[in-house]
Image (cartoon, rainbow, N blue to C red):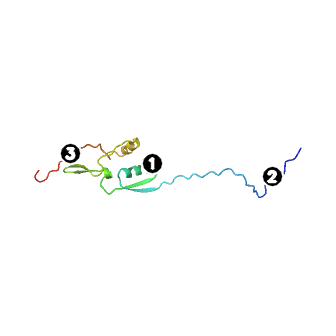
Amino acid sequence: MTSPLPRSATKLRGARTVPSRAPRQKKSAAPVARHFAIIGAGMAGVACARTLVQAGHRVTVFEKAPQAGGRTTTLDSAFGSFDAGAQYFTVRDPRFAQALDTVPGLCKPWSANSVRVLDAAG
């Protein structure tokens, strides 16, 4: 019966023995909640703020106008209501519809109304 070779006899010239270690487990740090500032309460600003809040962050939305809506805002005057920006948009994606539903009253169905502006002569 032959005896096994001594450990030193199995090494290759110049090779190093690396101690075996269990694979390191990455420490999973809890995500740190941050505070974000969103400029503008239009569709993009509101959607961005909503996504950040859902991810656990704090959000402050700044809007210069007295109401939210951005380019989808409707201005009321003695002559009627006027769309300040885009007259309409379409909702083809259910995620977009869901985002709009999170802010009740932000958008209204669009209807084509004719506006007649009267001058001093009527």
Query: Residue 10: image x %, image y %?
Result: 81, 52
Q: Residue at x 32, y 57 (%)?
A: 64
Q: Earlier in the sequence, mark 3 or mark 2?
A: 2
The amino acid pointed to by label 3 is Ser
Residue named by callout 2: 10
Choose between 89 and 37: the one closer to the eye. Answer: 89
Query: Residue 112: image x %, image y %?
Result: 24, 43
Q: Is residue 57 left or right of residue 92?
A: right
The amino acid pointed to by label 1 is Gln
Query: Residue 9: image x %, image y %?
Result: 83, 53
In the displayed orientation, state which residue is furthest to the left.
121
Q: Residue at x 13, y 53 (%)?
A: 119
Q: Residue at x 44, y 53 (%)?
A: 58
Q: Are marks 2 and 1 in contact (CB under 8 Å)?
A: no
Q: Is residue 113 left or right of residue 15?
A: left
Q: Are marks 3 and 1 in contact (CB under 8 Å)?
A: no
Q: Residues within 10 Å of mark 3 (few under 14, many from 20)?
A: few
Residue named by callout 3: 114
Quadrant in which the N terminus is drawn: top right
Choose between 16 and 35: the one closer to the eye. Answer: 16
Label disc, if present, on residue 75 of the rendered structure: none
Q: Residue at x 45, y 52 (%)?
A: 57
Label disc, if present, on residue 54 of the rendered structure: 1
Mark in front: 2 vs 1: 2
Choose between 121 and 20: the one closer to the eye. Answer: 121
Q: Earlier in the sequence, mark 3 or mark 1?
A: 1
